Image (cartoon, rainbow, N blue to C red):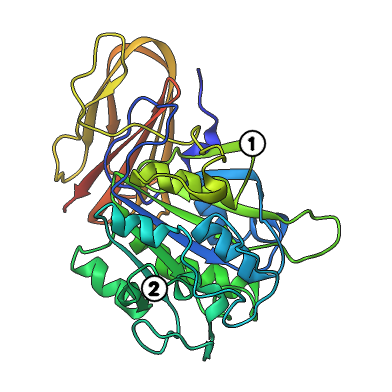
Amino acid sequence: MSIPRKFLLPAVLLLAAAPVHAAVPALDHVAVVVMENHDWSQVRGYPYVSSLRANGCELTNSFAISHPSQPNYLALWAASTLGSTDDACPPLGSPFTAANLGHSVEAAGKTWRSYSEDLPSVGSSTCNSGGYVRWHNPWTDFSNLNHQNQRPFTDLATDIANQTLPNLVFIVPNNCDNTHDCSIQTGDDWLSAHLPAVISAVGPNGVVILTWDEDSGTSGNNNHILTVFVGGRAKVGYQSTGTVNHYNVTRTICDALGLAPFASAASATPISDIWTAATGVGLPSASEISLSSPSPNPSQGSIAMSLRLPEPTSVHLAITDVAGRLVRRVDLGIRSGENVVQWDGRRGDGTMADPGLYFLHVAAGGQTFLRKATLVH
């Protein structure tokens, strides 16, 4: 089975991925980033968003639940709109005691945090502050979770630096950076500045979910939004064409973190076709494709990996840097048996790549393998 060349665009990912599983894998980290009020067709072509689509899995038939914002944020957090039909602050009926991701994560002995731009203080219940609005932060409206987990966005960089990223992360840009009040390009630039570090931080057994709360509200668009899964456990360059909504995303988060699904997530189908398997689980059998670690590593030039193929298949190699930029792409043709996959340390134009960390992406037999290697001169 050959792999479309489009999968070979950049990915900011860490270790290896091997055979695909049908179920949602158990993940160490899930990070959700929510943007605002644009149609699928409006946002998918912007430069950084396009790179994420190429690096991960685009859900091409993803839909929001309602209009305006607040019901959709509640749907993502609690798998229910809880009767909300507007952006009232606080919403009618709150504080809620219904099941939600925060409560479920805490009950399971795991950790979560929200990181919200312009939140004035930890656990604040304010309705507005700068570009912060409470109706984009649904955890504020529940009484059965720890509000100390509601953090200003600046805490995210600290937690990443300290390697204390929680199991579940929700990231909420302010009303300019989320494209609500400012241009789509502003939002794309914000994502390009902040998401690479998050994608790296979730590690080889994590995922980042980028989604929009709702579409622009234009008649006929049916609330069609962009949703992309990217990170160590997401396939590269894959499009999932099944129809999904916020409840399917919440159900997928529940399954990934080992939480009992609740409300509408309990009956929603998890998104299960987008995953690669974890590395280092047993040894490959003779019928499985396997890829060795790069050697030498670090290297002053050429880097090689051993690729074992049980049957003839197309093989493709791509190299990206830590910023997710494509350095080189090579089609290796049809291979079988024991093979050497080699990168000579050069860019596509023939010049030597700069010293630093690089990601090696090998596609073969319907699987995507990822390795990291360091060049030193």
Hey, which residue is sitting farthest right in the picture? 219
Q: Is residue 352 visible?
A: yes
Q: Is residue 349 visible?
A: no
Determine contact: label 2, label 1, CB under 8 Å. Answer: no
Q: Amino acid at mark 1?
A: Thr
Q: Quadrant of residue 22?
A: top left
Front residue of this view, candidates 253 and 192:
253
Q: Return the mark for residue 116.
A: none
**Marks 2 and 1, how far apart at CA:** 30 Å
Dot 2 alpha-carbon crowd within 10 angstroms: few under 14, some 14 to 19, many 20 or more: many
Residue occupying image coordinates x 21% and y 64%: 164
Q: Is residue 363 above or below residue 160?
A: above
Residue occupying image coordinates x 31% and y 15%: 288
Front residue of this view, candidates 35 and 78:
78
What is the x, y in percent for residue 114? 39, 70
What is the x, y in percent for residue 226? 62, 54
Q: Quadrant of residue 301?
A: top left
Dot 1 alpha-carbon crowd within 10 angstroms: few under 14, some 14 to 19, many 20 or more: few
Q: Is residue 152 above or below residue 355?
A: below
Q: Quadrant of residue 365?
A: top left
Q: Is residue 99 above or below residue 132?
A: above
Residue occupying image coordinates x 70% and y 61%: 66
Residue occupying image coordinates x 55% and y 67%: 188
What is the x, y in percent for residue 315? 41, 23
**Residue occupied by mark 2:** 115
Front of the two marks 2 and 1: 2
Q: Return the mark for residue 241.
A: 1
SS class of the residue under badge 2? strand
